[in-house]
Amino acid sequence: MCISPDLGDYQDWYFDLKQKAEKDLAKLATMEVEEKWREWKEEQINHRAAEQEAEITIAVRNQNGPYFISAAMSLGINAVFKGPFDVVQANPSVGQKCMASGLTPLPGSSTPTPTRTNPPRAAKRPSPSSTPHG
């Protein structure tokens, strides 16, 4: 049996077309699978985020400090707490005044002296010209 040149060209063309179609379909299927995979991962991330949000809400309502510390540590954040007694205050050196807060007063500040603008009524005396002469 002898195959004509036209039939051979047709078979080659058909074979090439079939391979290209299969290749394109495989690419399309891969893209579909990747899209579904991406959607699934997004759903999982959103679901886990919602769960963590619920955990945080419960922890906030219960004022659960250890939860926040452990969550911070799991993220690599170190929590450092300073209390009111952790602050180091400088002691004044010998011979300087010290205020109640432990700080030294600014130089040049002094206690203001009160000044009286109006003398009391008892100190006011009538002038001799205003008294009646009789």
Image: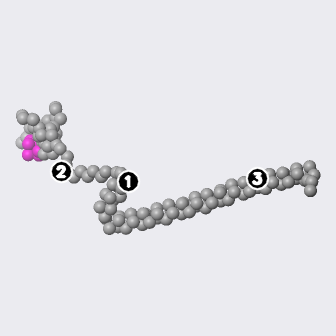
Residue occupying image coordinates x 74% and y 56%: 22
Q: Which is nearer the eye, 111 or 28?
A: 28
Mark closer to the observer (3, 2): 3
The image position of residue 123, as x and y in percent, is 8, 42
Q: Residue 20 carries which label?
A: 3
Q: What element carries label 3?
A: helix
- Residue at image x 27%, y 50%? 80
Residue 88 location (% of width, % of height): 17, 44
Residue labelled with disc 2: 85
In the rendered structure, which amino acid carries the disc numbered 3?
A: Lys
Cα distance in 3D space between marks 1 and 2: 29 Å
Q: In which quarter of the image is residue 105?
A: top left
Q: Is mark 1 on a helix, strand or loop?
A: loop
Q: Which quadrant of the rendered structure holds the N terminus?
A: bottom right
Nearer to us in this view, 69 or 13: 13
Describe residue 50's horizontal placement relative to residue 14 as left or right. Answer: left
Sequence-earlier tag: 1 or 3 = 3
Residue 91 spot, x, y in % from top left:
12, 40
Crowding near the residue tagged with mark 2, few <14, some 14–19, many ≥20 C-alpha atoms within 10 Å: few
Instruction: Name the kind of residue labelled 1 in the image.
Output: Leu
What residue span does the magenta drawing correspond to?
A: 120-126
Residue 123 highlighted magenta (yes or no): yes
Q: Find the distance from the CA under tag 3 to the CA under tag 2.
A: 77 Å
Evaluate whether residue 98 shows in this view: yes
| x and y, in percent, of residue 61 in the image | 35, 67
